[in-house]
Image (tube, rainbow, N blue to C red):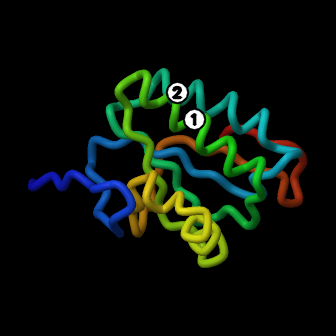
């Protein structure tokens, strides 16, 4: 199997089989940021050298949510882990582009149906909870 090494801000790239995938669901905002941040930091401790956040089910992301992504990316770099984003919905892809964050993260097109781990936002079900 050929492994592609994504360039920052380029994509969409196929996700290597060795990547750790965390599926985010619901809203990534002020109300969910601390719970999501805690779970993502824990995911870093069990990650391969590539941690992918599947954003396909993120329905909303505000500045606080973007702050979580940037903060977790900083922590990942200190651990020599690349933090990538996968399958952002059009509204989130637009926000990433407008804030120029699409050049700070490897962006992947899709994720496998069997993602490893899940972090759920508050869309209809209360604060973020792991699955």
Side of 25 relative to 35 (left or right): left
Mark 1 highlights which residue?
A: 72
Residue name at image x 72 percent, y 50 percent? 65
Side of 69 relative to 113 (left or right): right
Find residue 37 and report its image quarter: top right
Q: Residues within 10 Å of mark 1 (few under 14, many from 20)?
A: some
- For the residues labelled 2 and 1, the Cα–Cα distance comes to 5 Å
Location of residue 46 with respect to 8 vertically, above or below: above
Mark 2 highlights which residue?
A: 75
Residue 127 location (% of width, % of height): 86, 43
Between residues 103 and 21, which one lies in front from this camera angle? Answer: 103
Q: Secondary structure at mark 1?
A: helix
- Contact, mark 2 vs mark 1 (Cβ under 8 Å): yes
Residue 112 in view of the camera? no
Q: Secondary structure at mark 2?
A: helix
Residue name at image x 46 percent, y 30 percent? 76
């Amino acid at each position: 199997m050929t492994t592609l090494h994504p360039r920052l801000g380029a994509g969409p790239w196929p996700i290597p089989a060795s990547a750790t995938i965390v599926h985010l669901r619901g809203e990534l905002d002020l109300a969910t940021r601390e719970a999501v941040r805690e779970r993502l930091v824990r995911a870093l401790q069990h990650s391969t050298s590539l941690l992918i956040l599947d954003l396909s089910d993120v329905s909303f992301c505000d500045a606080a949510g973007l702050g979580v992504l940037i903060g977790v990316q900083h922590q990942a770099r200190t651990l020599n882990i690349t933090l990538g984003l996968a399958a952002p919905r059009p509204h989130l892809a637009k926000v990433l582009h407008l804030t120029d964050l699409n050049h700070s993260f490897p962006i992947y097109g899709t994720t496998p149906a069997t993602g490893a781990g899940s972090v759920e936002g508050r869309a209809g079900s209360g604060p973020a909870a792991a699955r």
